[in-house]
Amino acid sequence: MHRGKGMRFVGDSRVPAERKPNIPKDYSEYPGKTEAFWPNFLLKEWMVGAVFLIGYLILTISHESPLERKADPTDAGYIPLPDWYFLFLYQLLKYKYAAGDYVLIGTIVIPGLAFGALLLAPWLDRGAERRPSKRPVATGLMLIALISVTYLTWESVVTHDWEKAKEQGKIVKTNIDKNDPGYQVFKSQSCVGCHGSELSGGTGPSLIGTGLKPEDIMKIAKEGRGAMPANAYKGNEEDLKKLANFISKLEK
């Protein structure tokens, strides 16, 4: 049939003359290779998930959680340690040109370049090859990243003082009367910054169970001891006696 200038309309040869109803294939057509999503497949998934969940619950009950003492914002000597998957960044900040005056390089520039390259990887490397040897740039950058993360994580684990970390996070149960006048003096002085609000120690030693007499504590407050400088206490004599009596009575 012609219409217009040389236009011809023809039927689509891809459409079959006889249309069959759109009925899904029977599962028995491929025995052992397919199954119904509901309930067969989901039932297996739920069973596997239940086994892992029960195992996880047993592990959490049988193994005590590695909890540390209550966070103390006044403890300037506490050294936090991130989880294992951030140890490489933690180690990076220990180097000269990634910390101190260059801390922005270690916290923003280097991580930003690394994660930015990872985010843009599908657009930066659009080759059709799948073999690593055929994609030297992408393979090389990935190997460099893998080696760097592995080395920094290993270096962080090896050089960290785990005994000190365990000691500083140890839970110390004390019976401190925070309404005691001596504690109020302790809190108002600079003692909190070194010994912590719980008196369990920080940059300075723990003041719990020292075995010192009030006279000895007053002398240390005036004359200093070890890393503690002289005249660290700035209060009056009466408050110093309250502080000394309070510390001398503290027991673990």
Image (cartoon, grey):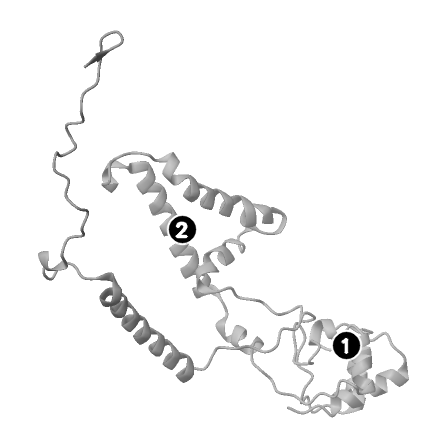
The number of numbered badges drawn on the structure is: 2
Residue located at (80% from left, 87% from top): 180
The single residue placed furthest to the top in the displayed view is: 5
Look at mark 2 in the image and give the residue it sits on: 148
Residue located at (86% from left, 74% from top): 234
**Taking 111 as reference, is 225 left or right?**
right
Name the amino acid type tagged 2: Ser
x and y percent of residue 143 in the render? 33, 46
- Towards the viewer: 58 or 116: 58
Secondary structure found at label 2? helix
Marks 1 and 2 close (CB-CB < 8 Å): no
**Residue 176 lies in what quarter of the image?**
bottom right
**Residue 18 lies in what quarter of the image?**
top left
Name the amino acid type tagged 1: Gly
Q: CA distance from mark 1 to mark 2?
A: 46 Å
Residue located at (33% from left, 34% from top): 126
Dot 2, how many residues are within 10 Å of its Cα: few (below 14), some (14-19), or many (20+)?
Answer: some
Look at mark 1 in the image and give the residue it sits on: 224
Dot 1, how many residues are within 10 Å of its Cα: few (below 14), some (14-19), or many (20+)?
Answer: some
x and y percent of residue 42 in the render? 28, 66
In the rendered view, tell whether residue 75 sits above or below residue 27: below
In the rendered view, tell whether residue 19 sits above or below residue 74: above
Secondary structure found at label 1? loop
x and y percent of residue 58 in the render? 37, 81
Position of the C terminus, as image quadrant, is bottom right
- Would you say residue 30 is visible in this rendering? no
In the rendered view, tell whether residue 143 sits above or below residue 164: above
Q: Earlier in the sequence, mark 1 or mark 2?
A: 2
- Would you say residue 234 is visible in this rendering? yes
**Taking 125 as reference, is 25 left or right?**
left
Q: Nearer the viewer, mark 1 or mark 2?
A: 2
